[in-house]
Image: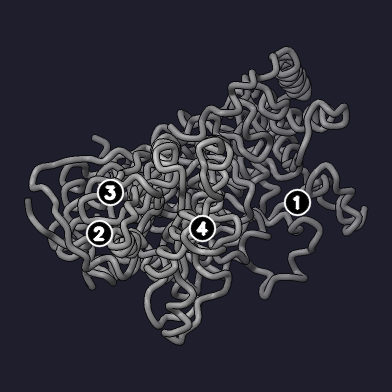
Amino acid sequence: MTSDKTKKQETAKKTPDLKHMLGQMLLIRRFEERAAQAYGLRKIGGFLHLYIGQEAVAVGSIAHLDLKRDYVYTAYRDHGHAIACGMDIKGLMAELYGKESGCSRGKGGSMHFFDKEKHFMGGNGIVGAHIPLAAGTAMKIKFNKENGVVLCFFGDGAIHQGSFHETLNLAKIWNLPVVFICENNQYGMGTDFRRVSSVDDFSIMGQSYGIPGKQVNGMDVQEVHREVGEAVYRAKEEGTPTLLEIKTYRYKGHSMSDPAKYRTKEELEEYKNQDPILILKDHLLKEKKLTEDEFQKMDKKIKDQVKAAADFAEKSPEPSLELLYEDVLV
Amino acid sequence: MAVITYREALRQALEEEMHRDKNVILLGEEVAQYNGAYKVSKGLLDEFGEERVIDTPITEEGFTGVAIGAAMAGMRPVVEWMTFNFSIQAMDQVFNNAAKMLYMSGGQFNIPIVFRGPNGPAEYLASQHSQALASIYAHFPGLKVVAPATPYDAKGLLKSAIRDDNPVVFMEAELIYAWEGDVPEEEYLIEIGKADLKKEGDDVSIITFGKPLQIVTEAADVLEKKGIHADILDLRSLRPLDEEAILKTVKKTNRAVIVDESWPVAGMASHIGWIISHKAFDFLDAPVELVTSEDVPMPYNHTLELAAQPSVDKIVQAVQKVMYIREA
């Protein structure tokens, strides 16, 4: 007979479904390539912060979650997390197009994807502003004695905000089941994190608050999956927080308006050589769990899916003006 | 009917609502073991335990954000700011998260939360600890803002605020906690967004909210002795604002003085003045007068401090001005 404890451990330490994770990463990549294209055609406006290069972080982490009882918070680079949470990409693309059929009725845009049902809590445009929210949701889990965890993703820019430091302290004094995941893509907008950070290993920042921390290679989805699994286990089993610094890299600029001249081509190439999708694909090919033909088929299917999402967004009507006044108050 | 303090009225509201709904929690600095910096939460820790009455460190942004995140997931937190002066540190959370979450999520995430504590000038506290911030909170769509001036209103409005599915900013005042008033034993609620005509008169409308109601009432007594009878409209709620009640009294008396202890620039008082001039212009017999705080940070010196704020004398003078009894 399986004890409750074992069940919890199984939940936390899931065996990775590598093919599924490959598909998820590919879907994020193709979705964003399409979004960038639509942005170029001025179908999408505003800021568009692409996640290309960082896919392993969201996919490897969120693969642990049961989004009936677990929750995800993230910042403005939120497309990858939303897709990894299983949000319908039609609604996501329509949101980028500002259509009423979008996941936030066209009122949120790129930085404000939400899906209450899937426990995807956003999407937040203010650097660090969502970090306390994540702890608050973890507080609800603890209050109701649920077996849940909150994953909170933020960038290397947010780690210097007061909201981060205040929240880590609160998460520890109240022992909240939350995993803080700093996705260190190495540039806070155009600023190399080494220029503005007192330390270059963010995982030690947890130590000030008695919270365990670890650095993780974010280009390797299997490593991300393994390490986040440990943290999820700790949150669910012991009810305590963890800080992970997941080292990653964004291939594009901070947003579409940023040509990213603050870094060298060599640096970019170096990371493209450790592309998270290619690493996993090569691994699966080598292990004979995937053939090149299967991969191409998967990619074709995903591209069709993304095209359908773009068509849906394109064809969706503009919102009615009455919508302007809705959703201000319940 | 029992005569109780404003402080006790708030405590009763919290106690009753915490009994009614287990999702209601109270958190803030000193709310639990210390029984509240102003003793509003006295006894609640003993009654409800440390899971529901939660002491926080002095980190307004952090604990306010945590409460908003709890509300996103279905709890109904009441956040006590030791004073609204410190809420300035939490403003990002209130304005960017609580106020806008429903809108930017396309109607998915409402935030059932109350932010409460003392707002407005106190005594001898100088500029950082003595300021009225109603206008700033009232500026943001997505928030409800209330400022009850009597124990009766405080209890009924706090109960409504806790049951409201929107974020409600609930403004009390340091000097108001000991004021007494009639509060019924039986349960009652006051609808947010309804002003209350506290006194009737035909000559002039004095419109106010929150703590200044007391000096407005004193000023009205002084004016009575001069044969001037004022309508006193207590707004109680700034957002939503009871425009109907404002226009009704102005159309009756044809003269208006607005008393607001906030600063004059871009304030509630100037907004109400605009509403009157816009929607009741033809009824006005005199330009609308405002009695606000002086446009300076609050000084420490008591003489200067009193001079910076609305006073009975300033209100009497303003009324005489709109009555054309005094020169401008």
User: SS for tag 4?
Assistant: strand
Three-letter code, disc 4: Leu
Q: Name the colour scheme.
A: one colour
Three-letter code, disc 1: Tyr
Distance from disc 2 to disc 3, alpha carbons, whole Å, reads 35 Å
Distance from disc 1 to disc 3, alpha carbons, whole Å, reads 63 Å
Which mark identifies residue A330? none
Distance from disc 4 to disc 1, alpha carbons, whole Å, reads 57 Å
Number of other residues with Cα within 10 Å of mark 3, as a class: few under 14, some 14 to 19, many 20 or more: few
State the residue position of label 1.
Answer: A249
Left or right: residue A300 compared with residue A227: right
Viewer-side residue, B38 vs B136: B136
Q: Is residue A105 visible?
A: yes
Circles 3 and 4, Cβ within 8 Å, touching? The answer is: no
At horizontal 65% and vertical 37% (from top left) the residue drawn is A80
Chain letter of the residue carrying label 1: A
Image spot of residue A162 (x, y percent): 56, 66
Question: Reading the chain from its start, which is encountered first: label 4 or label 2?
Answer: 2
Chain letter of the residue carrying label 2: B
State the residue position of label 2.
Answer: B53
Distance from disc 2 to disc 1, alpha carbons, whole Å, reads 43 Å
Distance from disc 4 to disc 2, alpha carbons, whole Å, reads 41 Å
State the residue position of label 3.
Answer: B198
Chain letter of the residue carrying label 3: B
State the residue position of label 4.
Answer: B290
Question: Reading the chain from its start, which is encountered first: label 2 or label 3?
Answer: 2
Viewer-side residue, B70 vs B39: B39
Three-letter code, disc 3: Lys
Q: Comparing marks 2 and 3, which lies closer to the viewer?
A: 3
Q: Comparing marks 4 and 2, which lies closer to the viewer?
A: 4
Q: Comparing marks 4 and 1, which lies closer to the viewer?
A: 4
Q: Is label 2 on the same chain as label 3?
A: yes
